[in-house]
Image (tube, grey):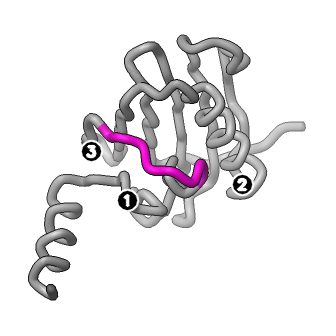
Amino acid sequence: MVLAGAAALIAVLATGNTAKQDFIKIGADDVPSVKLIIGEERKITSVSTTTENGVTKKIIKYKVSERQNREMQKYAETLISDYGYYYVYSDNDFSGTSGIDLQLVKASVEADHILYVRIDYDREGYTVMITRGRGTLTIIN
């Protein structure tokens, strides 16, 4: 049983599978996962992480869901209301099934760094892209 648990942990760490994780680790920051916010696991079709010029980017692609527009709206609204993210941009009102491009930003736990979350969805599924890099956040009312 211990070996099976260790093997499962190694598989998650090796593949970057975030479906069962409540938070997605990126640098010194933890970003709430879709599973944590919507309360259900969603099939992940791919996870990739890249680091270039001090900028880390994690892209998580989810399989299409019949409720994906509502799920992504809830995800974005919860990041804003409960986790201190700020709305930056959107070209959709979550009323359809495709075309969303929603962007949120938050100061990192590490000084002089920011987190940027971009949510896109279309008829193929949805993507959450988390970027962490150097920068400062200034909020103008």
Q: Position of residue 112 (x, y in %)?
A: 55, 56
Residue at (44% x, 13% y) in the render: 123
- Looking at the rendered image, the quarter that the N terminus falls into is bottom left
Give the extent of the magenta segment: 37-44
The secondary structure making up most of the magenta span is: loop
Q: Is residue 52 left or right of residue 20?
A: left
Amino acid at pointer 1: Lys
Residue at (21% x, 71% y) in the render: 9
Task: Give me the C-alpha separation between circle 3 and circle 1.
Answer: 17 Å
Crowding around mark 2 (Cα neighbors within 10 Å: few <14, some 14 to 19, many 20+) is: few
Q: Position of residue 19 (x, y in %)?
A: 37, 52
Amino acid at pointer 2: Gly
On screen, 128 above or below 114?
above
**Front disc: 3 or 1:** 1
Q: Earlier in the sequence, mark 2 or mark 1?
A: 1
Q: Which residue is mark 1?
A: 20
Q: Earlier in the sequence, mark 2 or mark 3?
A: 3
Q: Position of residue 27 (x, y in %)?
A: 38, 60
Q: Earlier in the sequence, mark 3 or mark 1?
A: 1
Q: Is residue 53 left or right of residue 64?
A: left
Image quadrant where residue 55 sits? top left
Q: Which residue is mark 3?
A: 49
Amino acid at pointer 3: Thr
Residue 84 disc label: 2
Q: Position of residue 24 (x, y in %)?
A: 42, 57
On screen, 36 above or below 45?
below
Residue at (67% x, 15% y) in the render: 92
Tell me the SS state at disc 1: loop
Q: Is residue 91 left or right of residue 16?
A: right
